[in-house]
Image (cartoon, grey):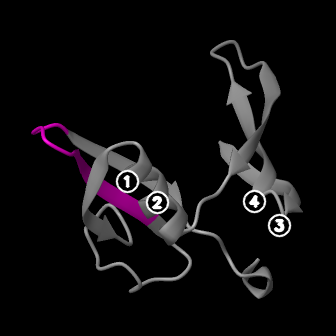
Amino acid sequence: MRKQRTLTRDRVRQVDQHELIYYVTYPDGRQERVVHAFPLRYLFRFEVEHLLARAGFQLEHLYAGFDKSPYGSTYPGDLVCVARRVGTRTTLRAAFRRRRRPADH
């Protein structure tokens, strides 16, 4: 079983501190709680577009989820980008978690 929780939010730096908590049951019946803490920096749409352009990519598609739903159709949701390196056939697919409004947590 796995749970997730947000410990802190730094809205200025756009960094949240998260924990993934795993409850592991071994074949011998022994149980263990494993906690993995990590920072997560979130990005906004225009920030992603700017960073992709600076890295030499052209944004081809922007989706609200992995089901290719149109961007803006769900909130909060994911920010899924499909970009191509300018001048090549290389495609970059990246997914970013969209930021929730403070009232939505």
Q: Which residues are magenta?
A: 79-90
Disc 3 target residue: 11
The type of residue carrying mark 3 is: Arg
Query: Is residue 101 located in the magenta-colored stretch of the structure?
Result: no
The type of residue carrying mark 4 is: Gln
The residue at 41%/84% (across/down) is: 72
User: Which class describes the residues within 10 Å of circle 1: few (<14), some (14-19), or many (20+)?
Assistant: some
At numbered mark 1, what does the secondary structure look like: helix, strand or loop? helix
Separation of disc 2 and disc 4 at Cα?
16 Å
Separation of disc 1 and disc 4 at Cα?
21 Å
Question: Does the residue at mark 2 contact the one at mark 3 (Cβ under 8 Å)?
Answer: no
Q: Position of residue 90 (x, y in %)?
A: 17, 37
Residue 97 drawn above or below residue 35: below
Total number of numbered labels?
A: 4
Q: Which mark is residue 53?
A: 1
At numbered mark 3, what does the secondary structure look like: helix, strand or loop? loop
Question: Does the residue at mark 1 contact the one at mark 4 (Cβ under 8 Å)?
Answer: no
User: Which class describes the residues within 10 Å of circle 4: few (<14), some (14-19), or many (20+)?
Assistant: few
At numbered mark 4, what does the secondary structure look like: helix, strand or loop? loop
Question: Does the residue at mark 3 contact the one at mark 4 (Cβ under 8 Å)?
Answer: yes
Disc 2 target residue: 50
User: Which class describes the residues within 10 Å of circle 2: few (<14), some (14-19), or many (20+)?
Assistant: few
Residue 59 drawn above or below residue 77: above
Q: Position of residue 23 (x, y in %)?
A: 74, 35
The residue at 73%/51% (across/down) is: 4
